[in-house]
Image (cartoon, helix red, strand yellow):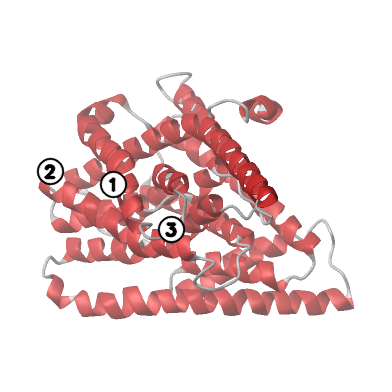
Amino acid sequence: MGVTLGSGWITRLPISYALIYLVVGIALSPYGLNLVRVRPDAEFLERLTEIVVLVSLFSCGLKMNRPLNLWAWRSTIRLIGLLMPLTIFAVAAIGHYFLKFDWGEAILLGAILAPTDPVLASEVQLFDTEDRDELRFGLTSEGGLNDALAFPFVYFGIHWLENDQWQTWFPKWVGVDLIWAIAAGLVMGIVVPQAIVWVDRRLQRIRPVDTLMEEFIALSIVLITYAVTELVYGYGFMAVFVAGIVTQRSYHNPDKQLAQLEFTERIEKLLEVATILLLGSLLRVEPIARFGVEGLFIAGILLFVIRPVSTMLCTWGENTHIVRRLLFGWFGVRGVGSLYYLFYAFGNGLGDETGEAIAWITFITIVVSVVLHGVTSTPIMNWYEKHLETRRQKLANSDYIRP
């Protein structure tokens, strides 16, 4: 209630909603009011974060307003195809050589921390279906895709944990976890929502559904697409993101598209509150002190060195203004997506002392990201909007003078 009633002031302040939820979560923990005492297991947290990411991915897909060609998605292709692998291998190298992790554990850490978060990013970089800005589009689409495409590297790390003789399982990883799972996710993300929309439109002609229930079709598309894709061993995250794009283009009624987007965003916001509050309540002083140096080291080098430098390298030669490239490098928000992959890894072989270290490094990195990006996003984006307006005015004046 407080966040909602104060949202008019909060949006003007250099803080994000996620930062408020995190602080309140800490206040509700045993270090504050001691109202939240639960310590949920990894499986519960995996399911919770899974649902949050699914809804957010579909919402990201609904916002994608570009034609489906390589030129229109050039920023996304560079951020996914070049930046994400560079980030994974850079973090893995640091984890192996500086933190003394085995290569499997180091690669797993890199894969957990590589995805930018579509849940928190949607709050930092507001983007809607009418927005044509390349920065916001690139960051939103990156958050939607890299949460899906980090999965092959997570599996790579898990396979290495199970068997460090990588030659024995590498061909299967390439065939199943890389090629088949991505292809199946792409195909199911197209076929399933088209089938559901076709049924919906046919039934609407016979008898319209209850208007109060109508927007639940969006949630149905998310869950059915994810379930069917997982049944054929595809990447459900990718399928749901693609399903959002397909759904947005399948309904020709703009009111329907807007209603579905608003519906999914409301669910996303509710789930974000629960997840970040819970994260704040789970933080403990002893393990943070124990792994704080490693966590701050990884968080600092990831956010201040790896992401900015890799972004500048990946966008080299592209017709993108230097300001945009710098902001691409700064807004690499880490959050719920990394939490999901962490808890998924715990359910698939990660554990012991190294598992605890990876967990707290991940928690610390997310907290640092929430604080830094939450504090800087409003002033930076306000400055960016003024910068764009100044450039538009200069271009308009030069066009006026040229004749």
Residue 167: which numbered mark, if any? none
As shown in the figure, which amino acid type bears the numbered disc 1?
Answer: Ile
As shown in the figure, which amino acid type bears the numbered disc 2?
Answer: Phe
Is residue 82 in sight in this rendering?
yes
Q: Is residue 169 left or right of residue 41?
A: left
Residue in the picture at 55% in, 33% down: 378
Image vertical order of residue 366 relative to residue 4, above or below: below
Q: CA distance from mark 2 to mark 1?
A: 15 Å
Q: Which tag, 3 or 2, sits closer to the chain's start?
A: 2
Q: Which tag, 3 or 1, sits closer to the chain's start?
A: 3
Circle 2 sits on which residue? 98
Marks 3 and 2 close (CB-CB < 8 Å) = no
Q: Indicate the quadrant where residue 165 lies.
A: bottom left
Quadrant occupied by the C terminus: bottom right
Circle 1 sits on which residue? 306
Q: 82 or 61: which is nearer to us?
A: 82
Q: Which tag, 2 or 1, sits closer to the chain's start?
A: 2
Is residue 232 in sight in this rendering?
no
Q: CA distance from mark 3 to mark 2?
A: 26 Å
Crowd band around label 3 with a 10 angstrom C-alpha radius: few (<14), some (14–19), many (20+): many
Circle 3 sits on which residue? 147
Residue in the picture at 75% in, 56% down: 259
Image vertical order of residue 24 relative to residue 348, above or below: above
